[in-house]
Image (cartoon, rainbow, N blue to C red):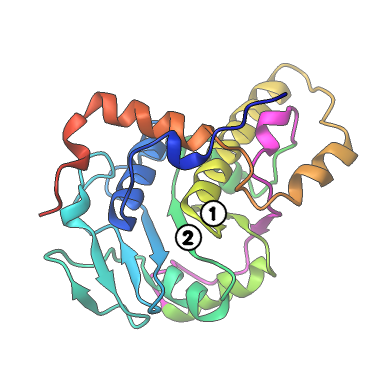
Amino acid sequence: MSFRPAPESLLPPLSPRQEIVLLARTLWREGYDDHLAGHITYKQSDGTLLCNPWFLLWDEFRAEDVIRIDLEGRVLEGRWPVPPGIPLHLELHKLRSDVTVALHNHPRWGTVWADLGRVPGCYDQSSSLGGGALALVDEYGGAVNDPRAARAAVEAMDGAEIALLANHGVFVLGSSIRAVHQRAVALEQRCEHAWHVEAAGGGRELPAAIQERNRKSDGNGFIGFWEAMVRRELRLDPSLLDPEG
């Protein structure tokens, strides 16, 4: 008889603000660390968005720094301004009701493939975990801090959950914090491993049937991965779950 623990038994209770902070902290260690770049939005039941603020690195902001904004980018709660590139998220949430969490950054290996304008091969199972279709978007006419360019980028994704934005970075979407964490980690691993495999002369991709099966995952099935990474962050900074504010 197998034992499958409930997710809530692996972590203390987390508020949405704590979840978004922990997502940023865990992914900073995975290479999502391009200085002040990057934004995360987390749609709430009232339609507003929790968001990381401008001016703070992903590895330093805390629950009390999370801002709440509306779909026009106006700050409803919080003491910090919105990140300059937030139109990409605003246009996404206007067009894609299926997305709860969206993440944009310029991780090292994902950005290399975005700069190449190529989708990397998928050479191992961990690189496909979390599921989601991966699209290359090279059809926007400028930086995504412009609402028109941002909307064009979202439309060019054509329903995909993950995108390489050519000459820019990556965009990862999901129905939960867990799903986006898993997909973001897998994407960066896929990009790094593909680079090394090609540098070594090439290799054999994961069988197409396995890739397709994994692509259909909603990212919420790998119980334990998100929890393990959160526990590492809490060991490194035990004060992260101190009362907000």
- What kind of element bears circle 2? strand
Q: Position of residue 112 (x, y in %)?
A: 55, 39
Is disc 2 surrounded by few (<14), some (14 to 19) or many (20+) residues within 10 Å? many
Q: For this rendering, which residue is in front, 227 or 80?
A: 227
* Residue 129 placement (x, y as % from top left): 66, 38
The residue drawn where x is 39% and y is 63% is 41
Viewer-nearest residue: 166 or 58: 58
Q: Which residue is mark 2?
A: 102
**What is the three-letter code of the residue carrying label 2?**
Ala
Q: Quadrant of residue 234?
A: top left
Q: Residue at x 22, y 75 (%)?
A: 75
Residue 144 placement (x, y as % from top left): 44, 68
Residue occupied by mark 1:
172
For image coordinates 43% across by 79% down, the residue present is: 147
199 lies above or below 59: above
Q: Quadrant of residue 143?
A: bottom left
What secondary structure is marked by label 1?
strand
Which range of residues does the magenta coloring cover?
122-146
Q: Quadrant of residue 210?
A: top right
- Do tag 2 and tag 1 residues touch (Cβ < 8 Å)? yes
Q: Give the position of the N terminus as an image quadrant.
A: top right
